[in-house]
Image (spheres, rainbow, N blue to C red):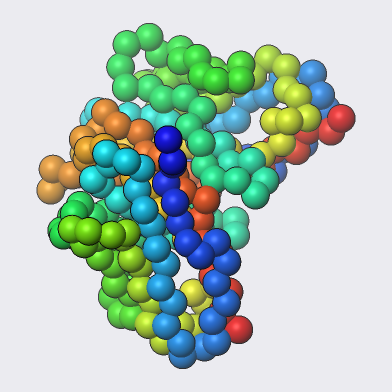
Amino acid sequence: NAGVMQNPRHLVRRRGQEARLRCSPMKGHSHVYWYRQLPEEGLKFMVYLQKENIIDESGMPKERFSAEFPKEGPSILRIQQVVRGDSAAYFCASSPAGTSNYEQYFGPGTRLTVT
Amino acid sequence: AQSVSQHNHHVILSEAASLELGCNYSYGGTVNLFWYVQYPGQHLQLLLKYFSGDPLVKGIKGFEAEFIKSKFSFNLRKPSVQWSDTAEYFCAVNRRQASGTYKYIFGTGTRLKVLA
């Protein structure tokens, strides 16, 4: 029974390149959440998606960041023209539904380093 | 601003010592409360959760937490820690927004180091 899968686990990009982070939710889960973790800052909510829908993107930076969760395939968090400040751990979580009664199940994270 | 506060950022204990990690939130109304743990190099795992009912919640690995509504607190406790409890602990609040969706707000985390 596979949990939430994220790949790659580690990603190194030079400034100005694009970073693509993938998240496959747990089987049967149709809700995906992305978080960013910076040292000493805890987890910051970025975006909440259902299949083919962005439900809440209030935590996403207005520029360079985008997310999708297509009908088929994993959810993708895309960061264009990366800068050093984008270096962080990015975690994906999934839940079976978006109501309050469901905990979120987290993936192992992708550690992005921008050089 | 509405937030989730974990006042202790780093805690060092000896094995067998008792643990209490503080968590306070500033949201009114109905909230759901969680504690997650992140062991070194691993992903976040749920320790325990509170939705309603008995305010004293028991979780995995001997952890428990008490919801005190009047204090807006959900402190995590363990009577006797082990070296294997070394990890980072996150408190989280899940509440309904005006849009109808629910959002998790996490605290900044507490790094616990248990000395053998």
Q: What is the quadrant of residue A22 in the picture?
A: bottom left
Figure check: A47 above or below A20: above
* Residue sitting at the far bottom: A16
* Residue sitting at the far right: B116
* Position of residue B106 measured from the top left corner of the image (x, y, whole percent): 43, 45
Figure check: A1 above or below B69: below
Say if residue A56 shows up in the picture: no
Quarter occupied by the C terminus of chain A: bottom right
Residue at the image point whose x is 32% and y is 22% from the top: B51
Say if residue B108 shows up in the picture: yes
Residue at the image point whose x is 42% and y is 46% from the top: A4
Residue at the image point whose x is 22% and y is 40% from the top: A98
Residue B28 relative to residue A24: left or right: left
Residue at the image point whose x is 57% and y is 66% from the top: A10
Figure check: B9 above or below A100: below
Please state which of residues B6 and A1 is positioned toward the viewer in this rendering: A1
* Position of residue A67 measured from the top left corner of the image (x, y, whole percent): 28, 67
Figure check: A55 above or below B106: below
* Residue sitting at the far left: B99
* Position of residue B94 measured from the top left corner of the image (x, y, whole percent): 32, 37
Numbered-mark total: 0
Quarter occupied by the N terminus of chain A: top left
Q: What is the quadrant of residue A97 in the picture?
A: top left
* Position of residue B33 measured from the top left corner of the image (x, y, whole percent): 38, 30
Residue B71 relative to residue B11: left or right: left
